[in-house]
Image (tube, rainbow, N blue to C red):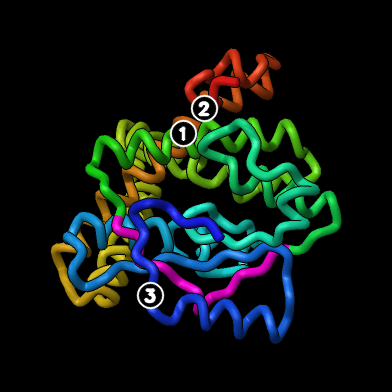
Amino acid sequence: MIFDSDCIIPKNYLSEVSKQLKQNYFDCFGGPDRAMSSFSNLQKAIDFTMTSFLTTGGIRGGSEKIDRFQPRSFNMGISKIAFEVSGGFGNIHPGEDPDLSIRLWKLGFETKLFSEAFVYHKRRIDWDKFYIQVNKFGKARPILNSWYPEFNKITYFFPSVFIVGFYFSIFLLIFAQDLLLKLYFIYFFILFLVATFKTKNFIVGFLSVKAAWKQFSGYGIGFIESFFKIIILKKQPEQAFPELFFKK
């Protein structure tokens, strides 16, 4: 079982995992993350944007509606046989968890979301660190797409399209066209309302809007840069982004 060092494990976590495995065994599983009431407003806002269906589609641990579930290494379990056959995590980071999930699928293993096996993810982070983190996530995805093109999804392009579309909406103001920009404001307002309702804190609601922007812009820009270097220019990932790989 694998957790991040900034995760707090609920007392019933192991019993929940045991129950799920007895009902339907899987060689690799993962669970979502949540925020505790004692977390700071910033931590709650980032937790919301990282887990909400409105921002990520829930693919980071809370939902299987958008895509086949890929367990994340902040909250993951893997059998001994699956770990040994796959060789465990690869050399890329971040992106090590979807890389492992895909290799497990190709080897015939199945992954599963255990929605009640959650952890409290107390991210030790600020705005700049958060941007850097999601920017690396964006850079890692085209690398994974180049390794496993059969598992590429159009949803991976959404943050980049979102960012390009936003700046295009600003450009349209030159021609007195503001409809697209209004749609963005409606989206962010809905995001504010949902975050405020869920956390019962309007400050977290406001911060969630900023966190969503940081998430989309960081991931989207990283994805575009990596897509150009890896997919268009055909550069070697280790040479294009050495910061994403552990030194051998």
- The residue type indicated by label 2 comes to Leu
Secondary structure of the residue carrying tag 1 is helix
Quadrant of the frame with the N terminus: bottom right
Marks 2 and 3 in Cβ contact (< 8 Å): no
Nearest to N terminus: mark 2 or mark 3 = 3
Check residue 10 in the rendering and tell me which mark sits there, or answer none: 3
Marks 1 and 2 in Cβ contact (< 8 Å): yes
Secondary structure of the residue carrying tag 3 is loop
Give residue 204's position: percent from left, percent from top. Answer: 19, 63
Residue at image point 45% right, 40% down: 165
**Is 184 located above or below residue 44 in the figure?**
above
Marks 1 and 3 in Cβ contact (< 8 Å): no
- The residue type indicated by label 3 comes to Pro
Residue 112 figure quarter = bottom right
Quadrant of the frame with the C terminus: top right
Residue at image point 64% right, 42% down: 89
Left or right: 208, with 74 as reference point:
left
Residue 143 figure quarter = top right
Mark 3 burial class by Cα count in 10 Å: few <14, some 14-19, many 20+: few
Check residue 244 in the rendering and tell me which mark sits there, or answer none: 2
Question: Real-space Cα distance between discs 1 and 2?
Answer: 7 Å
Check residue 145 in the rendering and tell me which mark sits there, or answer none: none
Q: Which residue is mark 1?
A: 136
Give residue 102's position: percent from left, percent from top. Answer: 73, 48
Question: Real-space Cα distance between discs 2 and 3?
Answer: 31 Å
- Say which of marks 1 and 3 sits in front: 3
Secondary structure of the residue carrying tag 2 is helix
- The magenta segment is 111-122
